[in-house]
Image: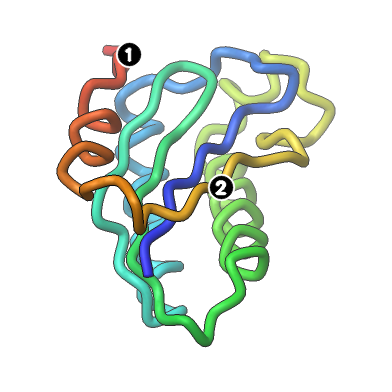
Amino acid sequence: MHVHLVFVTKYRRGVFDDEMLTRCEKIMRKVCEDFEAELKEFNGERDHVHLLINYPPKIAVSKLVNSLKGVSARRIRQEFTGRINRAIMHGHLWSPSYFSASCGGAPLAIVRQYIEQQKRPL
């Protein structure tokens, strides 16, 4: 099964740069591996990230999302403390909400292309 996920930063603050997004991708790849899932595509902009994940049907998307957001927030806040604190996000990286869409109907190539075309900050 495939799912397209979008996570936005708290208050849509533009905190990400290329270095932070690269680290976030590595963290999220590891979380997916722990769930026996595969992060097929990752990209983002200053205030949000897109993920395309192939996951087994035994995994609840909500549990995967909870782990992805929790682990990434903890690690990103630890490693980039000054940049996150300056954004005045009250100790949070992610907004509590998220977007999730199954990708069974759309060809995966189209979803991957959409994610690749995000305007990643330099």
Q: Is disc 1 surrounded by few (<14), some (14 to 19) or many (20+) residues within 10 Å?
A: some
Q: Quadrant of the rendered structure where residue 86 is?
A: top right
Helix, strand, or loop for circle 1? loop
| Residue 37 or residue 31, whichever sits in front | 37
What kind of residue is marked 1? Pro
Q: Quadrant of the C terminus?
A: top left
Q: Which residue is mark 2?
A: 100
As shown in the figure, which amino acid type bears the numbered disc 2?
Ser
Against 105, is 42 above or below?
A: above
- Quarter assignment of residue 27: bottom left
Q: Quadrant of residue 37?
A: bottom left
* Mark earlier in primary sequence (1, 2): 2
| Residue under the point 70% across and 23% down | 85
- The residue at 30%/68% (across/down) is 38
- Residue drawn at (24%, 56%) of the image: 40
Name above or below for residue 25 compared with residue 119: below
Circle 1 is placed at which residue position?
121
User: Which residue extends farthest front?
Assistant: 105
